[in-house]
Every structure is written in structure tokens, then in C-alpha cells.
Image (cartoon, grey):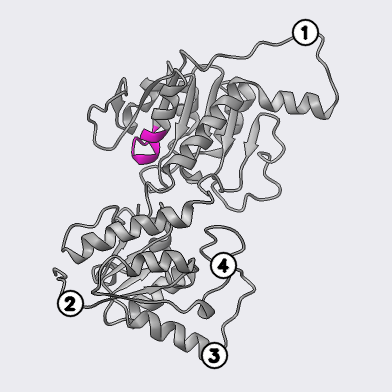
């Protein structure tokens, strides 16, 4: 249904957001009414803390006001309470809901976790913030590649031990090396851009195999082992779906040439962690920089915590001080498209949930 300039559209802010960014949303069009009650939203503990302080509690009266506010809206900025349960509740209670914009780039998992059936999910659209996190994730991937090539883990160990090695060990040049990126979407393409600026050549995988500027070879995931034979570094940006579950298994790690640097900024379920540990042990992988894990938080007994060739990042590489602004700007652009009756970008696929 096309929204016109004469139709009033109500947007409710369901998650913490700075007042000046709320005003940017209000400024998109005079036909937009924005419902924003900061006393109903938990305070942020850090920039882009979309869930807010877990100690925050609404009074029964505030809880009623919160849901009354959300149920008036055709559009929600954020999942209610930033949770799958909140999504399930609003889907069942709202008679007006047409579109929810999620804060996450990979919101498909939360939509799946809501337990909503296909019929319920047809009643409204969910867009993600995919692309907003591309630059910080790509910068983190570059950090992982450089750490691996420049032996930063070994340097840190020597520093902690106050050890000045008698024999100096050379580092590897990033320039002239080859990178394989699994998932040449916005994050993967941005990673490739930075890698090329460092002098790397790049190949990668994509669901739809097509030529991409600056990419030597593009294949689908079935062709991944063939790409790995010449890779000096591999960066995974793929989401967690049934088709990517443990894509990086023993066979795939075995297809890598010895000494490959591995970085994961996609989803932890894409990697068989036991197979990764084996690859680290036998030298197929010389260093792993991991921001995501099969189980999060990473269990205390995971050997990845203390592995001398692994960097553990607590799923924070996408965060930046600019995140709220970037998401709000993306939402404003999408809202303009919504009001004009256009096709919203970055819709969650409610079959494959990515």
C-alpha cells in the first residue's frame, strides 16, 4: 500500500535514542508523527547500547504506556525491548504495524527466535541496518589480517615475558598477498576495498555469482575450496543460516595453504570451532582473529580464550561511536522510501532468516 503525503504515518521509537536523532526522524516529512518517551526507555551504558541498562525497570503504569505507544504506530524504530520476545508480542498486539527497522545488520536470527510463523511474518516487514556496520567491521578485519602478518600475538607474549629474542623473526608483507572474502555483500566489499588499499589482491564468494570491480574471481560457496589454495588470508562475513552452518569445516580448513590468517566478523555458527582448533594446531591456520562464536558469550572453558594464536573479541567489532547516527540516517532514508511507496532495502528473508 502506497503512503502519500496526505496520509499520517506514526513512528514509535522502541529503543534508546538521542533526542537530536529523534528530531532528524521527525524532519523527514510533515506527515510523520514520532512517538518518543525517553522515560520509558532504558538509559544507554555506551554509544549504540540499543538494549540499554539491564537494571532498568518500568513501573506497571510505564509498561502500559510503552506498549500503548508502540501499538499506535505503523512503523517501529527497533524491536520492542530489543528482543525476540518483544517482536513476538508486538506482532500479536498491533493492529497497525507495517514495518519494523532493526538495529542489527543480522536481524534474521532475532526474527527466527521470535517464533512467529510465516502467516504472522507476512503482516509486516522487517528491515535491517546492514551496511551501517560495514566500515567498522572491515577495519576490524584489516586489523586481524595485519595482526596475523605482523605477529602481534607473539610480540605481546614476548613483551609480557620481557623477552628479547636472540634470533629476529621476519614478518610477512600484506602488500602482494591474496585475500579471500566469504560473503561479498556490503561488509565483504568494504573489506575488499581496504585490502586492495593495502596492496592485496582479492577473490571471494557470493550467492549470485557475478563480476565485481576489483575482485579477481567470484564464486559461490561450493567453489570456496578452489579459492583457498592461493589465499594468504581469509575473512568471513557470512551470516548464520542453515546453508552456512559450519561451512568452515575440516575439509575447508584443509583446503587452505599452510599459514593462512583467518578472520571471522560474520557469525560464529559458520565455523566448526573444533576444526579451527585443529587447523591452528597443524599450521594450516597461523592466526585467527574472531569477533563471533558458535555460543555467545564464549564459554569460560573454551580453549579459544587462551590459545596463543587467537584473538578473542566479544562481538563488538561492529560498534563505533557513530553507530546511532548512522542507523538513524539509514532509517530516515528508508522512511522516505516507505512514504513514497518504494521498495525497502535490506528486508529480512523470512524463509532463510538473514
Distance, label 2 to label 1, CA atoms, is 74 Å
Q: Earlier in the sequence, mark 4 or mark 3?
A: 4
Instruction: Please tell me the numbered disc located at residue 7.
Output: 2
How far separated are the C-alphas under marks 2 and 4?
A: 33 Å
- The secondary structure type at the circle numbered 2 is loop
Residue 60 numbered mark, or none: 3
Residue span colored magenta: 182-190
Q: Quadrant of the N terminus?
A: bottom left
Quick one: label 4, few (<14), some, or many (20+) residues within 10 Å? many
> From mark 4 to mark 3, how far is it between C-alphas?
19 Å
The residue that mark 1 highlights is 167
How many dots with numbers? 4
Between residues 278 and 213, which one lies in front from this camera angle? 213
- The mark that comes first in sequence, 1 or 3, is 3
- Measured Cα–Cα span from mark 4 to mark 1: 50 Å
- Mark positioned earlier in the residue sequence (2 or 3): 2
- Which is nearer the eye, 11 or 346? 11
Circle 4 sits on which residue? 52
User: Magenta segment: does it hold 186?
Assistant: yes
Amino acid at each position: 500500500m502506497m503512503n502519500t503525503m496526505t496520509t499520517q504515518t506514526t513512528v514509535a521509537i522502541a529503543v534508546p535514542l538521542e533526542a537530536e536523532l529523534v528530531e532528524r526522524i521527525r524532519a523527514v516529512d510533515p506527515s510523520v508523527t514520532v512517538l518518543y518517551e525517553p522515560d520509558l526507555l532504558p538509559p544507554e551504558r555506551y554509544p549504540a547500547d540499543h538494549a540499554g541498562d539491564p537494571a532498568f525497570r518500568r513501573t506497571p503504569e510505564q509498561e502500559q504506556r510503552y506498549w500503548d505507544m508502540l501499538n499506535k504506530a505503523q512503523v517501529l524504530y527497533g524491536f520492542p525491548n530489543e528482543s525476540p520476545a518483544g517482536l513476538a508480542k508486538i506482532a500479536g498486539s498491533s493492529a497497525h504495524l507495517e514495518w519494523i527497522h532493526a538495529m542489527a545488520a543480522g536481524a534474521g536470527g532475532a526474527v527466527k527466535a521470535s517464533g512467529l510463523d510465516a502467516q504472522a511474518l507476512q503482516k509486516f516487514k522487517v528491515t535491517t541496518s546492514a551496511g551501517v556496520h560495514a566500515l567498522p567491521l572491515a577495519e576490524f578485519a584489516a586489523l586481524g589480517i595485519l595482526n596475523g602478518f605482523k605477529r602481534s600475538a607473539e610480540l605481546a607474549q614476548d613483551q609480557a615475558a620481557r623477552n628479547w629474542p636472540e634470533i629476529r623473526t621476519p614478518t610477512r608483507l600484506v602488500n602482494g598477498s591474496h585475500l579471500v572474502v566469504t560473503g561479498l555483500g556490503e561488509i565483504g566489499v568494504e573489506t575488499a576495498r581496504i585490502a586492495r588499499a593495502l596492496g592485496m589482491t582479492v577473490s571471494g564468494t557470493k550467492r549470485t555469482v557475478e563480476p565485481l570491480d576489483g575482485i579477481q574471481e567470484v564464486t559461490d560457496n561450493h567453489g570456496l575450496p578452489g579459492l583457498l589454495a592461493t589465499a594468504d588470508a581469509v575473512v568471513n562475513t557470512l551470516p548464520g543460516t542453515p546453508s552456512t552452518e559450519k561451512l568452515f569445516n575440516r575439509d575447508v580448513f584443509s583446503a587452505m595453504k599452510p599459514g593462512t590468517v583467518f578472520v571471522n566478523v560474520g557469525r560464529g555458527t559458520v565455523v566448526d570451532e573444533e576444526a579451527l582448533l585443529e587447523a591452528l594446531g597443524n599450521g594450516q591456520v597461523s592466526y585467527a582473529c574472531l569477533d563471533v562464536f558458535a555460543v555467545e558469550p564464549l564459554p569460560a572453558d573454551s580453549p579459544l580464550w587462551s590459545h596463543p594464536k587467537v584473538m578473542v573479541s566479544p562481538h563488538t567489532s561492529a560498534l563505533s561511536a557513530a553507530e546511532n547516527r548512522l542507523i538513524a540516517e539509514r532509517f530516515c532514508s528508508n522512511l522516505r522510501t516507505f512514504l513514497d511507496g518504494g521498495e525497502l532495502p535490506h528486508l529480512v528473508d523470512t524463509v532463510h532468516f538473514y
